[in-house]
Image: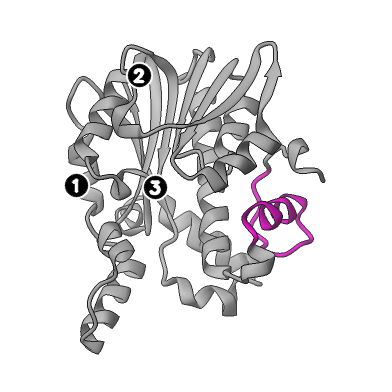
Amino acid sequence: MEISELEYRVAFNMDDSDPIQKVLNELYEYSTTRDFDSMYCHRMRLNLFHGIMSEAIEKKQLTKFDTALDIGANAGIYSKMISDFGFKSVYGIDIDDHQLDKAKKYFTSDKPDKLVWFENANAETLPTDKKYDFIVCSEVIEHTTNPAKVISNIKAMLTEGGIAVISLPNGMSLPFALSWVGYKVKGRPIPGELADHMKYPSYRTLSLFSNGGVKIIKSTGTNLVYWHLYKFVTKSSLFTKVNYWLAKNWPFKYFSQFFFIVITK
């Protein structure tokens, strides 16, 4: 399958028998880096996002498909998925030119009623006079210098009746908690990225988006157990599916590694 022909399908096998996984391996260089942990977590987040979108459309929570914004577009996978769900115009932004170059190369589209384009832009300085029917912001807020501004911008840019999907690493999840304990036991300082990921336990994410003119209509999550188990057990699709299902649902979602919320205005 050519990358430009990608049409996402949910799957739980992490091998090259899945055409979508082949595309992801090429786009994110998983075959070269052999970073199985990242590959696994990434695929589960994509599965969950696809499910969230499908459910929002089925329940008619998402009814307007004119404009969409992908904050932290990276290599463009979310933007492509959003476009395939029927949005007429999808604007992806990121500050990583290396990843943006991939997004521009493979997923830019100038087709009428199916526009997709990408720019280097900072989520903290986006103009809020432009409104979007759908916004996704996945694993971005924790890395910004002014998270409150990004959150404020998302709320301001969402159209009345539009929805936004936000995901953040969950500081009270088992994977991050075990990593934190490991560093403490060894007497080593917590590295910056892990420290960033520990800032947003699920209850804090809920509080940040429970006001300001928006309301939370769904919360969910993905990846419940410790990630270093993956390489030993994920050849079993049963384990993968159980881990995925548990992390999505109450009460386990509040302890999932990646916590997702859906808001509307």
Around disc 3, counting alpha carbons within 10 Å, would you say few (fewer than 14), some (14 to 19), or many (20 or more)?
Answer: some
Q: Secondary structure at mark 2?
A: strand
Q: Secondary structure at mark 3?
A: loop
Which image quadrant is residue 34 in? bottom right
| Magenta stretch encompasses residue 182 | no
User: Residue 121 appears at what percent x and percent y?
Assistant: 42, 32
Highlighted range, magenta:
9-29
Instruction: Work out how far the residue at label 2 is from the one at label 1, CA to CA, in angstroms.
Output: 21 Å
Task: Spot the residue most to the right.
Answer: 1
For the C terminus, the quadrant is top left
Judged left or right of residue 138, residue 111 is right
Mark closer to the observer (2, 1): 2
The residue positioned 79% from the left and 60% from the top of the image is: 17
**Which residue in the protein does label 1 denote?**
204
Q: Amino acid at mark 1?
A: Arg
**Which residue in the protein does label 3 denote?**
139
Indicate which disc, 2 or 1, sits on the residue closer to the N terminus: 2
